[in-house]
Image: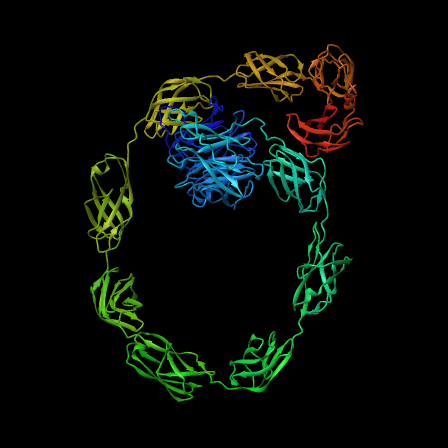
Amino acid sequence: MVVVRVGDGATTPALSNNAAAVYLDEYTPAGALVQTIMLPTTATSTQRLFSLAGTANSEGMLSLSTDGRYLTLAGYEAPVGTTNVATTTSARIIARIDANGNVDTSTGLTDAYLGSNIRGAVTDDGTRFWLAGNSSTGSSAGTRYAALGATNSVQISATPANVRSVGIFGGQLYNSSAAASYIGVNAVGTGLPTTTGQTSTLVVPDNTGSSPSPYGFVLLDLDATVAGPDVAYVADDRTTAGGGIYKYSLVGGTWTLNGTISATTGLRGLTARATGSSVTLFATSNSTLYSVTDNTGYNVAPAAAATLTTLKAAATNTVYRGVAFAPTAGATSTAPTIASFTPGSGPAGTVVTISGANFTGATAVSFNGTAATSFTVNSASSITATVPAGATSGTITVTTPGGTATSLVSFTVTAPNPVPTISGLSPNTAVAGSAGFTLTVTGSSFLPSAVINFNGTALTTTFVSAGELTAAVPASALATAGTYNVTVTNPAPGGGTSTALPFTVTSATPAPTIASFTPASGPVGTVVTITGTDFTGATAVSFNGTAASSFTINSATSITATVPTGATTGAIAITTPGGTATSTTNFTVTVPNPLPVISSLSPNTAVAGSPAFTLTVTGTGFVNGSAVNFSGAALTTTFVSATQLTAAVPASAITTAGTYNVTVTNPAPGGGTSAAATFTVTTPAPTVTSFTPASGPVGTVVTITGTNLTGATGVSFNGMAATSFTVNSATSITATVPTGATSGTIAVTTPGGTATSATSFTVTVPNPAPTISSLSPSTTVAGSPAFTLTVTGTGFVTGSVVNFNGTVLTTTFVSATQLTAAVPATAVATAGTYNVTVTNPAPGGGTSAAATFTVTAPTPAPTIASFTPVSGPVGTVVTITGTNLTGATAVTFNGTAATAFSVVSATSITATVPAGATTGTIAVTTPGGTATSTTSFTVTVPTPAPTVTSFTPASGPVGTVVTITGANLTGATAVSFNGTAATSFTVNSATSITATVPAGATSGTIAVTTPGGTATSTTSFTVTTPTPAPTITAISPSSGAVGSVVTITGTNLTGATAVAFNGVNAPTFTVVSATQLTVTVPAGASSGTISVTTPGGTATSANVFTVTTPTANAAARALDGLTVYPNPVENVLNVRLAGAVPAAEVLVTDMLGRVVLNGRLAADGTLDTSRLPSGNYLVTFTTKLGKTTRKVSKQ
């Protein structure tokens, strides 16, 4: 297994939250170190650097890809030593490591877990990554997805925002978290989602006591009777009681806690591998790698003897993080196989059960190439899948990480039965209690097995045609009156039940009678109780022919009904299914009281706090018993006439200003309450008696005294609204003098009116705020003597002062636009930029914005002490050493300006010798002057051009080493053959180079490039073609004993140097022609392929030559007759078993030995190879007569 180690073990610096180097230590299961891989700490053109925080316990979770080929780890693109690395915005790096130790850190994300920890990543195939971490920025937190090489990621699940670890088990993505509502292991979406908006669902809840802290987790499939993963182990990093590894089992669809392997060392990393029911777990804390074995299996607590064993302790100043099994080159799961499926046919939507082996982790199921609508992995040997829409008849395939299995027989997709429709029933009604009868149903899409359902009960049905059915309806179905649904059902596949048509069973109801009613009279709206017989099922009640507003059947002898609007005096009638009954006496409809109307009130207003008074209400429709209501309270009312009422209004009703509703209510019958008239209670007028202070500038707070000031809505100073005001009480207001106010009276406005002060408030004017427009002088040299500073601007007043760098200067007022001030020498002793301001005194006044005064430092003269090198050609970079070189503006070589120069420091400049420069002194110019070197720089002559005089050999194939002779070849940077760069070359001397002819080279001249130029040969080098590779197309015979002569047919056999039988070389063979040779089977040969070697390469036969013993029997000869064709094959491989060969088990493997197809043939047949990738495969047939193998090429 592999452990993440942070830190190199050096004693300093100690690990902290700063970035540290990361290593992967591989150990054997016994704890012996195998190798160490260091992740890159410097960036290259293709890789990013990688680091982790030294003390961030939650980081560094390690995972193995589901295909077993890669380890995945997440960290930061930050140099070692970066302070508090998790809080930076450095890119978050996903490191992928293969079995050969190759590290890929090309995935760097700029939008994930910003300002906090990235903790881990998981992948299924090395190109897709799911991430865990945390961030205070919600959009960069949660569970995320990114592709290999990406710079951005997708937040697939926003909650929980704080994710500790991620894992893939049984084709499903999971995460762990300690966030509320998600404490434990959560399923993220369905399968392996890559899009936003997924939901994390808690599936393995951590309810293991106070402050649970889940980190790494593993889900395993230990019980074949439970579909998918059924046992979970979760690491908990508590260092007190409650820490350790928790075991859960999936029981009846719910994850149940089985027990704990206790540990208080802070476990976080976790991985496991199962062998049968035995599980070996490896876990890490900061300091230790542990192992433990749990042999109890599904839904049983770990044994008491299952305790942690230390495999390795972390070295001083290093820590362990995640743990995972090492990747394997070309790792893959065991290939799946399909043995059978049931049913063998069905329409789209049929659920098919597929039996076989190695189905765990299946990623796809298809029907003749169309993906199943859905599928469920029940166990390693069983999958249920739904036939998709659009599927056609053909083989079924199951794909897992181990490969794809194809059924040997086809599933037949059938057309489903139609859903029937009903258009009519005959008859469609009957009387309750009738005898049984035959029902005719018409419609469409009826089948011979269609069934008619009457009120949910299937009837004995006769099929007449696709548009007509008949059925016997028994008398028992008609016993009770009502409406019953009739439907038709077609059987599966497809089929279904039609929409329903109603069949009505009516009752033979007796006629109703009316004996009496009460009351005998009343206005519209009166509720009348009617007594009689057979009222059940009544459908109408009317008063002298007008339908009742509503009615209720109380029993077979009683109905209550409401007299409707428009009813007149007359008889009452009741209608039931049995007929209509009419009363023998009349109901008298009486006239109700009218609804009153108010036209005016007198008075209609009063001042709040007034005494009681009499209110006169004028209108229409008033009656004896009418009542006047004031704000909802009934008043003592006197009826004067149908158009006038009087009422006593008490003083308590008008204590508060406001608008009140007055209504009149007439008693029943009829009557009611009128629409409301409005009575207004007004507020008393305010007064202003005094204010203080009597004067002040804008912003002064003034206290105003008076009466009735409550509810004030405005305060103004000589007509200008106060900046703000506060009503302290009914007698006091405080208000602020507004900008723009002038001297005058103060006014206060309330709902009761406006009060104005008898005297005026005087508004005083404050000093202005000063401004600076210029300084004279505005600059001086550090160390200058004291001087007078003139400040020009506006708003200056007597008392204005000038401030220099915060110090008040002695100031003279010249005018409102000019001041002078004495600046002492001490204020300009040091170079720098200083602020100058002017302050005016109160009232008003203030300090101006600052103007800048600059004190400059004197620049020292430069000097040149030395330079290196002391000579060189044009383009040489020269380093010049001296003093006071900062701010250099020019560098010259004997008067010619340098091509370029760079001021490295105050004591160093680098400059490039320019074209046209001659030998002489070097000069450097700065603002402090020009310095000239005391010695000269010598300008040298450039490198001479190369020449090519000859080369040997003059021709040869790709890979030939050619010796090139010429002059001035030292320092050669390139050699090419007719424009194609040599595979490699070596400069032997100034006159000799050896170079290798590259792949892709063609005949042409040879060119050599040096710093002095490029030389081309005067003659061409000829690139020759290598000998063509041989092929074997047939061998005859296909079997024989040692000493037999075999004829091999093929191409390019001329010059053959060796012939071998399954690796054993034949001592004698004869090349008959370029297409044929004969060879004798050598001693020691065994059954296998035949190979022929020529100067052009080695060819191997597609078919196996069987070496027989002298007693070879009929069984071997029969197997020799088994043939496969065509070869090469595209989609279908034909198999001819030959007459004597019985049924054969068929196994197809790729050249790595992985099973890609298997099954059984009882006779000659075919194999579907359409889904196999191009390449070579071995087809092995096992029969009762023995085993034989054929090699097949897939195009």
Q: Is residue 45 left or right of residue 881?
A: right
Colour approach in the figure = rainbow
Q: Is residue 316 left or right of residue 1105?
A: left
Callout count:
0
Residue 1158, position as x, y percentages in the image: 68, 31
Q: Quadrant of residue 631?
A: bottom left
As drawn, the residue found furthest toward the bottom would be: 641
Q: Locate the C terminus and report the quarter of the image it occupies.
A: top right
Pick the residue in front: 1111 or 402: 1111
Can residue 1186 be seen here? The reply is: yes
Q: Is residue 455 above or below residue 1011?
A: below
Residue 137, position as x, y percentages in the image: 43, 43
Q: Is residue 147 above or below residue 4?
A: below
Q: Is residue 1174 above or below residue 820?
A: above
Q: Quadrant of residue 4?
A: top left
Can residue 894 be seen here? The reply is: no
Residue 486, position as x, y percentages in the image: 69, 62
Pick the residue in front: 421 or 389: 421
As drawn, the residue found furthest toward the top would be: 1067
Pick the residue in front: 1170 or 759: 1170
Q: Is residue 1052 left or right of residue 225?
A: right
